[in-house]
Image (cartoon, rainbow, N blue to C red):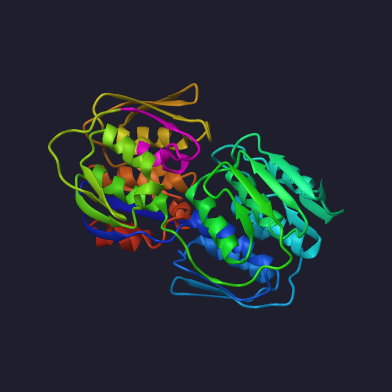
Amino acid sequence: MSEMIISGGIELRGKVQTSGSKNAVLPILAASLLTTERIVIKRVPDLEDVRTMIEILNALEIETVFEDGVIEIKAHKSCKNVVPYHLIRKMRASFNILGPLSVMNDTAQVPLPGGCSIGPRPVDIHLMGLKKLGFDNHIEYGVVFTEKVGMVKEAVIDLPFPSVGATEQILSTAVKLEGTTTLLNNAAKEPEITQLVDFLIGMGAKIEGKGTSTLKITGVRELHGLEFEVIYDRMEAGTYLIAGLITGGEIEVEGYVEEDNIALTEVLTKLNAPFRVEKDRAFTYHSLTPMKGAFVKADVFPYFPTDMQPQMTTLLTLCQGQSVVQDVVFPERNSHAEELRRFGAGIFVRNQSIMINGVDELEGAPVMATDLRCAAALILAGLSANGDTLIQEVDHIFRGYDKITKKLRGLGAEVEIK
């Protein structure tokens, strides 16, 4: 695993371009199985998770080309129906290949995804949805086996909570079931879900209720190829915005889409953070007025995103007064809190809430990243802290932040990967 060394205390300045959304492109790549025609996807970030999904497509004997932010998935007659475990174990999002693979082949064998450091994310809702769509399924030795056992004319699927993964899985299966009408209730409404709906409709799918918690899907016989551009990554845009704020710098974040980042914008306004938002971009500026603490609750969209919770927690360590952070999506997502203590932050965890007493400054320290967003939080702390910071196992960051070292250096940061 790599290490990152940061010489902190530098005010970041300049312009940074947000890349395409990781959380949007992964389910789109899984859904690309639903046609044998050529697909071209643009504004694709060059990330380890994207490369893993491409490897999965290649393992299914689907030819792909990935160059300069564009993935071409070439036309093919068929694909295999078995996914190797060593690829599925790398990331949980790869499990969304199960539905499309099942509907294209009538059967599929996909290993259960690996564990997750931020808390349990069971797949039972995925399997419940597939069963209601007519796919029998069972688990043997850690592998999910599916088989189409008949046609369902009407399927009503009520999700117990608005699971993003289950919503993606069910959408990417139901659209290709000709003769089946599916009503999906309590669906997730994240921008990445809306993006998947747009992609599927572009392929010829019939979906009603885009952007709402109730989706009606009328299955069709065939879907076709298309060219499609991925939305900006709202988590990356938000992370760079916080980087400007936490270092007291003046930066411009291109690709900060206001309607996708409403909850973050509202929290930063509550903190009295020195920033402004214009069309598809955000700016930070230097201010002598200190930011103040707040209560932040991470929840499903349109509320504050759990994938920005660790980064916001880092910013709150330098806000005056007390702050409390709760994460109802992943209550155990708090490994970054203990590492932030090493910087001198006044932070502790109590009853799955992160309690923060703001300090004036942080001091560089050796720390260890446990997951993607934890790594982002520690990088933000290192950028702000006095002196040098050594982040061990920083490789997690390359799963979700395209060219992060180059982008940070472009803003004046002193960072080095060893």
Task: Tell me the magenta residue range.
Answer: 294-312
Image coords of residue 292 (percent x, y): 24, 29
Image coords of residue 261 (percent x, y): 38, 46
Q: Residue at x 32, y 56 (%)?
A: 280
Image coords of residue 415 (percent x, y): 30, 56
The image shows residue 92, relative to residue 66, as above or below, that is above
Q: Residue at x 76, y 60 (%)?
A: 178
Front residue of 259/365: it is: 259
Front residue of 199/269: it is: 199
The image shows residue 290, relative to residue 387, as above or below, that is above
Q: Is residue 52 visible?
A: no
Image coords of residue 56 (percent x, y): 65, 65
Image quadrant of residue 84? bottom right
Residue at the top extreme of this rendering: 351
Image quadrant of residue 34? bottom right
Horizontal side, residue 267 vs residue 229: left or right: left
| Residue 8 belongs to magenta span | no
Horizontal side, residue 224 vs residue 283: left or right: right
Q: Residue at x 65, y 68 (%)?
A: 57
